């Protein structure tokens, strides 16, 4: 008998997240576990069970769910395989961990700055999304802003001893609620993380963000193939906390345009890759870019006056902090390269509106 209430707990104890992934579930039974994985944020689930009667019952329950299918043998390409044994999940694939002297550790190409505050579940998913990148040459700087013990424990567990992950705990006392409301806290934390980056390129994300497996690989390729560009902007997918709804909040970097894929020529300009416009990135309407869509060359940090004051600290409104940073990049005269691919997602939940509280969040 499968205890559905413990499935998520057991997977997290194993350091596994299914958010945004195509999952194959072996010994799925009559489908209840598959639904539980969808509620946990799986993009799709293929349930597999040799018992045809169980599969028929499972299919009958899922007629209105195109992202859940059931078969007697696996027929779908998946990101992660889970088998149910004696009522417990067993993960069939493992994450690669390099040796500490490996070049991907000592000389990373990409630096990822992840800010964290009191979201143990979400920060676990965010860290795992970085560890599952197709490109291995990265470092992750988890910059925590005086979180509670549960969050720190979750960060350490999700890091799994990977030498590419560095946990930076904020020094000094815990900021008061008044201080949190008066400042863009993640801007302060980002600035602290920037003092430790070693990569050629830098990107940013919060603990409620998720980057897709090809994110760093595609961004690196964009920079390598376009040396005159210092900024890239990809597409963003917004997702409700329980993954019940997905929607694109920002289309191609130029509104109304469909961008060519890498290696293709834009028929309008004769150029292989078109650039984004700062008018779009800085737009105050819904098309405005989130900071998780932006990546920069590390040389920009020196041009912006150094790591300690690179990201403007304005007030508690996150979108104001993003806009102020983008405006500083714009004034440097750097062109932004549009990547016509959805490489990141942001999860919206009760605390997404910039509320500053000290309580434990998801």
Image (cartoon, rainbow, N blue to C red):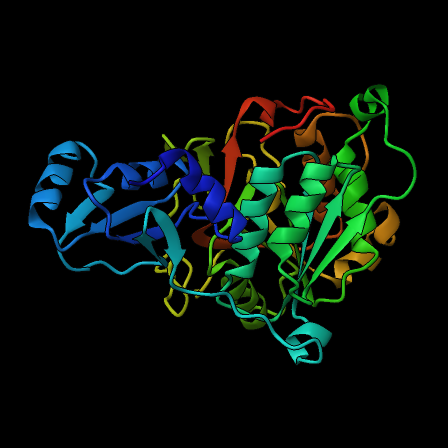
Location of residue 233 in the rendering, given as x and y in whole percent from the top left corner: 55, 50
User: Is residue 360 placed above or below 334 in the rendered structure?
Assistant: above
Q: Is residue 116 visible in the rendered structure shown here? A: no
Location of residue 115 in the rendering, given as x and y in whole percent from the top left corner: 70, 43
Left or right, residue 244 beside residue 163? left
Q: Residue furthest top?
A: 178
Of residue 84 and residue 19, the one placed in the foreground of this image is 84
Left or right, residue 44 beside residue 295? left
Left or right, residue 10 beside residue 334? left
Which quadrant holds the C terminus?
A: top right
Of residue 359 and residue 85, the one placed in the foreground of this image is 85
Q: Is residue 8 visible in the rendered structure shown here? A: yes
Question: Could you tell me which residue is drawn at 17 percent across and 35 percent down?
Answer: 62
Of residue 62 and residue 104, the one placed in the foreground of this image is 62
Question: Could you tell me which residue is drawn at 47 percent across and 65 percent down?
Answer: 94
User: Is residue 25 placed above or below 236 in the rendered structure?
Assistant: below
Q: Residue furthest right?
A: 172
Which quadrant holds the N terminus?
A: top left
Location of residue 318 in the rendering, given as x and y in whole percent from the top left corner: 68, 30
Report which quarter residue 187 is drawn in: top right
Report which quarter residue 101 is drawn in: bottom right
Question: Could you tell me which residue is drawn at 11 percent across and 37 percent down?
Answer: 57
- Number of dots carrying numbers: 0
Of residue 264 and residue 340, the one placed in the foreground of this image is 340
Location of residue 29 in the rendering, given as x and y in whole percent from the top left corner: 21, 44
Question: Could you tell me which residue is drawn at 79 percent across and 56 percent down?
Answer: 301
């Amino acid at each position: 008998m499968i205890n559905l209430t413990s499935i998520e707990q057991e997977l997290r104890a194993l350091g596994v997240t299914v958010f945004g992934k195509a999952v194959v579930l072996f010994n799925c039974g009559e489908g209840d576990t598959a639904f539980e994985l969808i509620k946990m944020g799986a993009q799709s689930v293929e349930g597999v069970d040799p018992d045809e009667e169980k599969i028929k019952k499972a299919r009958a329950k899922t007629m209105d769910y195109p992202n859940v299918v059931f078969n007697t043998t696996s027929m779908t390409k998946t990101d992660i395989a889970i088998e149910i044994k004696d009522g417990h999940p067993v993960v069939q694939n493992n994450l690669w961990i390099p040796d500490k002297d490996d070049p991907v550790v000592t000389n990373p190409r990409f630096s990822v700055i992840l800010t964290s505050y009191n979201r143990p579940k979400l920060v676990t998913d965010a860290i795992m999304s970085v560890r599952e990148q197709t490109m291995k040459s990265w470092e992750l700087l988890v910059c925590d802003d005086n979180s509670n013990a549960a969050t720190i424990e979750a960060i350490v567990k999700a890091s799994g001893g990977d030498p590419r992950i560095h946990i930076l705990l904020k020094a000094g006392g815990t900021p008061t609620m008044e201080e949190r409301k008066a400042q863009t806290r993640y801007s302060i934390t980002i600035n602290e993380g920037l003092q430790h980056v070693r990569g050629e390129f830098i990107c940013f994300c919060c603990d409620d963000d998720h980057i897709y497996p090809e994110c760093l690989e595609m961004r690196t390729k964009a920079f390598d193939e376009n040396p005159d560009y210092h900024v890239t902007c990809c597409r963003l997918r917004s997702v409700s906390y329980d993954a019940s709804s997905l929607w694109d909040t920002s289309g191609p970097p130029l509104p109304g345009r469909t961008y060519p894929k890498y290696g293709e020529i834009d028929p309008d300009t004769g150029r292989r890759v078109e650039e984004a416009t700062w008018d779009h990135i800085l737009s105050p309407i819904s098309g405005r870019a989130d900071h998780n869509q932006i990546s920069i060359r590390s040389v920009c940090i020196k041009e912006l006056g150094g790591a300690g004051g690179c990201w403007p600290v304005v007030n508690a409104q996150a979108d104001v902090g993003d806009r102020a940073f983008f405006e500083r990049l714009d004034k440097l005269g750097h062109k932004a390269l549009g990547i016509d691919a959805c490489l990141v997602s942001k999860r919206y939940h009760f605390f997404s509106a910039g509320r500053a509280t000290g309580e434990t969040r998801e």
